[in-house]
Amino acid sequence: MIDICVNWFKAPFDKDREDILSRAQDAGITHIFSTGSTVENSQQSAEIAKLRPELFSATAGIHPHYASSWNKNSQDAIEQLLQLDVVRALGECGLDFNRNFSSPEEQIFAFEQQIELAIKYQKPLFMHQRDAHDSFIKIIKEKRKDFTKGVVHCFTGTEEELDDYLELDLHIGLTGWICDERRGFHMHDFIPKIPLSRLMIETDAPYLSPRTMKPRIHRNEPAFLVHLVQQLADIYGCSFAEVAKQTEQTTKPFYNLD
């Protein structure tokens, strides 16, 4: 199993990263994407991927929460990282109008600039969208013919939004959100619309610990990806092994993993 989104350099992991890796490997996790959301942790992600390429890959980008930090210096730093083989996607980038830690205008500008970098370096886009679908899809439609591939990570949207993404030949990343009976179970009705050839799996750790875990542990980690895979097996009506195999077969060519 490949976890396409772990926020590896967040503080909740500071004390026991090696133990977390050991548990992940015991659970069958073969590769982890350390996600970049700022210049600093994009650089950190690239470093861990260079040190341990058998286990880690990196993404590099500016999350919409931090879009106000986008300037010539941050652009140059991200562009430099994109030239590394271990940095396999541009992101996490996109729009988040739920919290607006950066203004919508700043977010749109940073997102459009990062798409241009993905086009320039022919890297996949690793994208975030929350409460901003109309603006997000407008930008994607305008640029879709120019960028190679894209995944909408941590998809939590409506069936109509899913249809829009699939129509544009985008991949979908699902998280433990769908294991949450309070807010994610309604998605089970339309998740089967996603072909396994377009589906990838992620923990988004340390966030979104699966509520189907008993007992539940608040801090999420890559080993807990198994609970998401089991939930997906139940939804698709197939085996755990089939979901694990098919999502890995989808993920490897998307990110040009050997």
Image (cartoon, rainbow, N blue to C red):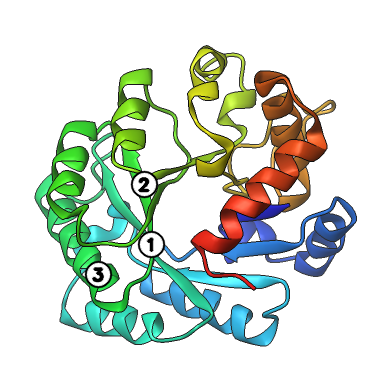
Mark 3 or 2: the one toward you: 3
Helix, strand or loop at label 1? It is: strand
Residue 5 appearing in the image:
no
Q: Are marks 1 and 2 in contact (CB under 8 Å)?
A: yes
Q: Are marks 1 and 3 in contact (CB under 8 Å)?
A: no
Residue 166 appearing in the image:
yes
Helix, strand or loop at label 2? It is: strand
Label 3 crowd (10 A; few <14 / some 14-19 / many >=20): some
Q: Mark 3 points at which residue?
A: 119
Residue name at image x 64 percent, y 73 percent:
258
Residue 25: which disc?
none
Q: Name the residue under label 1.
A: 91
Residue name at image x 17 percent, y 44 percent:
141
* 203 in relation to 185, above or below: below
Q: Do the residues labelled 3 and 2 touch (CB within 8 Å)?
A: no
Which one is earlier in the sequence, the residue at label 1 or at label 3? Answer: 1
Q: How many marks?
A: 3
Q: Where is residue 136 in the image (x, y as percent from the top left)?
A: 21, 41
Residue name at image x 61 percent, y 14 percent:
181
Q: Where is residue 15 in the image (x, y as percent from the top left)?
A: 75, 65
How far is mark 3 from mark 2, CA to CA?
18 Å
**For the view shown, which residue lies furthest in the right direction?**
26
Mark 1 or 3: the one toward you: 3
Q: Position of residue 86 (x, y in %)?
A: 54, 80
Q: Mark 2 points at which residue?
A: 128
The image quadrant that residue 12 belongs to is bottom right
Which one is earlier in the sequence, the residue at label 3 or at label 2? Answer: 3
* 48 in relation to 143, above or below: below
Q: What residue type is labelled 1?
A: Gly
